[in-house]
Structures are given as structure tokens and as C-alpha cells.
């Protein structure tokens, strides 16, 4: 894209100046001096440069490694680097390169999710990391929520927010893994004898309860959808729904519970695809097209945005 920009939009005498602004080059010495001026630590400077330098022996991804070393000069694609979250990508590349410390970082999702249900007014029984074994298969329930009439089995996944197609596929893999766990655990709890035994071990009275599942995600990429019959919800939205029960706009505050307090029915509605709370967002989506002409070719991008006026109208209709 940088080449096309300089080739098509600028005269020959300006191309070298423009190209050097888009992809500036620094000698090894100059780049070290610039970075060391920030950290004042030559060891850390070398580590940072090494971490963000592209290796041509591995998969090249300039969002992860924007420093390209060629002929003794570091070339930096500024349009990509400026729009990249370098701190986030630093963690991602450290994980994929096998860094032990980054791979052993604790995930707070299970604790945070359990805390949400412990604080809500339903006052359910909340268990975490419950081991399950059914039909010679083993699994683990991240968060198990037991109310008067329902058992909610939650699988927590906390991937980094994807920045490329490879990571989009990674998020999809997380969903498949979560589905596999939930299918196993739901089947186990569907066995009445197994359910009675597990509850008895934890001194929880048994009664017939309907079994529900949910995938709680650390980013909002699949929020509101269902995957193989398991609803996917964003952790921050789940927290707002369970604790506050409101939607705020510039104009007003809407209550999304049916009564003054959170009830089981509210939770069931929230986990359904057909309720106004979920449909309001999807019904307000509008298609947006962008086209870029490149010689005889056209590059088209289709995306979706939210029509705020439609959202406001539906909120007024459904929650006033």
C-alpha cells in the first residue's frame, strides 16, 4: 500500500521524500540511541529491539514485529505501527515464541466471573474449577452457578483481542474448545445420578433444575451470538447486566430487568438470542462499503456499523 501510494499519488521528484516518511529507516546505532533515551537501559533496549524485529525464518507479521532489518538499517512501516497496540502485541509474540513467564500469566476471568454472580441479588451458589468425569472423559467447569431452578455451566475464555486473520481463527478455536467442554459437562449434569452425587459431595440439596450453558469471553468479538447452542457473552457486559441492569445513552438510562431486582427470568432472557436486549444491537446494524481503486482493480471492504438512532428508538420501544 505504501508503494502504491507513492507510485500513484506523487510525482517522481517527491517519491523518495514521501517514501522515507511512510517507511523511515534508522541505522542500528541511531535506533538504539533513540530507544535507550526512553529506557536508559542498554540491556532492555537490546531486548526490545530483538523482540520487535522481524524474523524471516518465521511467519512475518508486521503488527507483531514492525522492525525490519535490511542492509544494516531498521525500516519501520509507520502506518501499521501507529495503529498497532505494541504492548498487547508484545504479550502475544512472547506467548507464541514460548516465553515461559508470559505463558504462565494468571487469567483473572474465572475469578471475575464468579465474583459477578456472588455479588448479584440472586444470591446463587457459585463454585469454580469443578472437576467433571463422564463416560471416561474428563473436564472442568470454570464457573458453576446454581440457583433455585437452574444450573448454569460457564466456560471462560480470555484471548487477546484479535488483530489479524490468524488470531481471528485463534478466537474461533477458543470457541470450539469451550463448546467441547460445555457439551461434556452438560451431558454429565444431564445424568441425574451423577448430578445428585456431585451436589451431595458439596452438601448442596438436590432438586430438579434446568441446565443452561454460557461461554464468557474476554473480548466482545462474538458477543450476543450463540455457538453450537451455547450463548457467548462479553465479561464486561455480563457484569453490567447482573449488577446494574441498565443501559445508558446520552439521553437517558434504561432498566433492562423486568422488576426492580434481578430475577431468574432476567438471566434466562439475557442468555437467549430472541430477547429485545440482544436483538436491539443486531437489528440496528447497517452495512457499510468502502472501495479503493488501484489501477484497473478495485479493493472492496464490507463492514457493519451501529445506527444509533435505531438503537435509541428500539430502547424506547422495549425498555420504557
Image (spheres, helix red, strand yellow):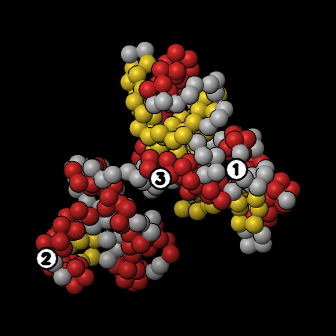
Tell me which label, 3 or 2, sits earlier in the chain: 2
- Determine the residue positioned at 61% across, 29% down: 211
Q: Where is residue 291 in the image (x, y as percent from the top left)?
A: 62, 60
- Determine the residue positioned at 13% across, 72% down: 43
Tell me which label, 1 or 3, sits earlier in the chain: 3
- Comparing 107 with 164, the one in front is 107
Circle 1/circle 2 CB separation < 8 Å:
no
Q: Is mark 3 on a helix, strand or loop?
A: helix
Residue at mark 1 to residue at mark 3: CA–CA distance: 19 Å
Q: Name the residue under label 2.
A: 42
Asked if residue 88 shows in the view, the reply is: yes
Q: What element carries label 1?
A: loop
Comparing marks 1 and 3, which lies closer to the viewer?
1
Q: Position of residue 35 (x, y in %)?
A: 23, 79
Report crowding for label 2: few under 14, some 14 to 19, many 20 or more residues within 10 A (C-alpha). Answer: some
Q: Where is residue 53 in the image (x, y as percent from the top left)?
A: 24, 63
- Determine the residue positioned at 43% across, 19% down: 134
Tell me which label, 1 or 2, sits earlier in the chain: 2
Tell me the number on the disc at residue 112.
Answer: 3
In the image, is residue 84 above or below residue 111?
below
Comparing marks 3 and 2, which lies closer to the viewer?
3
Q: Name the residue under label 1.
A: 262
- Determine the residue positioned at 45% across, 69% down: 83
Q: Quadrant of residue 260?
A: bottom right
In the image, is residue 190 above or below residue 222?
above
Q: Is mark 2 on a helix, strand or loop?
A: helix
Comparing marks 1 and 2, which lies closer to the viewer?
1
Amino acid at each position: 500500500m505504501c508503494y502504491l501510494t507513492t507510485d500513484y499519488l506523487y510525482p517522481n521528484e517527491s517519491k523518495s521524500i514521501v517514501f522515507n516518511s511512510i517507511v523511515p529507516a534508522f541505522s542500528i546505532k541511531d535506533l538504539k540511541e533513540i530507544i535507550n533515551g526512553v529506557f536508559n537501559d542498554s540491556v532492555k533496549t537490546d531486548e526490545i529491539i530483538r523482540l520487535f524485529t522481524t524474523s524471516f525464518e518465521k511467519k512475518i507479521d508486521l503488527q507483531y514485529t514492525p522492525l525490519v532489518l535490511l542492509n544494516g538499517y531498521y525500516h519501520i512501516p509507520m502506518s501499521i505501527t501507529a495503529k498497532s497496540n505494541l504492548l498487547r502485541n508484545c504479550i502475544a509474540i512472547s506467548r507464541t515464541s514460548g516465553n515461559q513467564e508470559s505463558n504462565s500469566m494468571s487469567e483473572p476471568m474465572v475469578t471475575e466471573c464468579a465474583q459477578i454472580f456472588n455479588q448479584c441479588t440472586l444470591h446463587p451458589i457459585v463454585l469454580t474449577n469443578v472437576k467433571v468425569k463422564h463416560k471416561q472423559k474428563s473436564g472442568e467447569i470454570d464457573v458453576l452457578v446454581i440457583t433455585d431452578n437452574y444450573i448454569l455451566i460457564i466456560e471462560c475464555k480470555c484471548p487477546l483481542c484479535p488483530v489479524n486473520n490468524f488470531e481471528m481463527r485463534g478466537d474461533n478455536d477458543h470457541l470450539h474448545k469451550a463448546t467441547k467442554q460445555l457439551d461434556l459437562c452438560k451431558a454429565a449434569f444431564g445424568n441425574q445420578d451423577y448430578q445428585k452425587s456431585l451436589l451431595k459431595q458439596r452438601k448442596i440439596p438436590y432438586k430438579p433444575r434446568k441446565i443452561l450453558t454460557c461461554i464468557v469471553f474476554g473480548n466482545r468479538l462474538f458477543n450476543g451470538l450463540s455457538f453450537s447452542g451455547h450463548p457467548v457473552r462479553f465479561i464486561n457486559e455480563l457484569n453490567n447486566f447482573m449488577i446494574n441492569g441498565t443501559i445508558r445513552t446520552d439521553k437517558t438510562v434504561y432498566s433492562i430487568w423486568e422488576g426492580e431486582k434481578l430475577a431468574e427470568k432476567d438471566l434466562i432472557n439475557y442468555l437467549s438470542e430472541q430477547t429485545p436486549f440482544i436483538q436491539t444491537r443486531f437489528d440496528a446494524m447497517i452495512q457499510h462499503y468502502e472501495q479503493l481503486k488501484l489501477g484497473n482493480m478495485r479493493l472492496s471492504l464490507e463492514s457493519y456499523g451501529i445506527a444509533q438512532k435505531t438503537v435509541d428508538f428500539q430502547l424506547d420501544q422495549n425498555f420504557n
